[in-house]
Image (cartoon, rainbow, N blue to C red):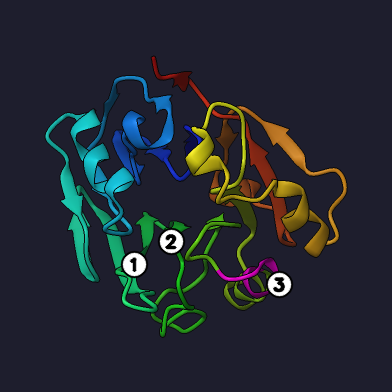
Amino acid sequence: MDINWYGFCCFRLRERRVTAICDPFSSKATGIQLPRLSADIVTISSSSSARVQGTGTVGGGPKILRGPGDYEVKQVLVTGLPTSQNGTRSVAFFLDFAGLTVGHLGELGQVPASAGGEELGDIDVLLAPVSGPHIPDVSRIAEVISQLDPRIVVPMQYRHEGLRSEQSDSLEPVDRFLKELGISEPEVTDTLKLTKTSLPEETQVVLLRPTGAARAG
């Protein structure tokens, strides 16, 4: 599997001939212009305008998943669990690519009710928000990670170059999250390439550089 991050909350997951895009965003809301993307599956974790407007940026006639439930698209099993809080709609999606499971927590309001249970099984990669107006404090995020016990954690939704100031101002630098986890030198890469057999024994944090994302004009 290859995992790329396009900044803010958007990821591309590619396993063999299946591609999923998680939380594509609009350039108007974020200030970042996504490259041309094509997918079989698109997950939208919340009703925020940045995410809702981003669905139009993905070609290929994908199946768009917006709410809780169990889905199957091209032999990928997808579980959507509600994480809403304080009137905001939010869904965490867990995608099982033939035994390799990736979780995208979206705008996590609260821990999914089934998190850590047998329903989800082992979570190999967790794409976790570390700041934002609806995101719990980093200490709570660390608790969620401990509860879900993934092999790899990839932070998202933190302050980085290219974001519009109004978006960036609501986010924290990733350093605060790393400090909470006691990590001083995380692995940094452009693309996360992994197989079931290459996963680390203990939870590892990997920072991805934004791929192919250009500043919107």
- Report which residue position mark 2 lands on: 107
| Marks 2 & 3, CB-CB < 8 Å contact | no
| Marks 2 & 1, CB-CB < 8 Å contact | yes
User: Of 15 and 191, which appears nearest the observer?
Assistant: 191
Quadrant of the rendered image containing residue 112: bottom left
**For this view, does 211 lie left or right of residue 95?**
right
Residue at 35% over, 46% down: 23
Residue 35 against residue 150 in the figure, above or below: above
Residue at 34% over, 38% down: 25
CA gap, disc 1 and disc 3 = 20 Å
SS of the residue under disc 3 = helix
Could you tell which of marks 2 and 3 lies nearer the N-terminus? 2
**For this view, does 5 lie left or right of residue 144?**
left
Residue 116 location (% of width, % of height): 52, 80
- Report which residue position mark 3 lands on: 139
Mark 1 belongs to which amino acid?
Ser
Mark 3 belongs to which amino acid?
Ser
SS of the residue under disc 1 = loop
Residue at 52% over, 69% down: 122
Mark 2 belongs to which amino acid?
Glu
- Report which residue position mark 1 lands on: 90
CA gap, disc 2 and disc 3 = 16 Å
Residue 212 against residue 196 in the figure, above or below: above
SS of the residue under disc 2 = loop
| Quadrant of image for the C terminus | top left
Query: Magenta residues, as a range?
Result: 136-141
Let me know if residue 10 is in the magenta part. Answer: no
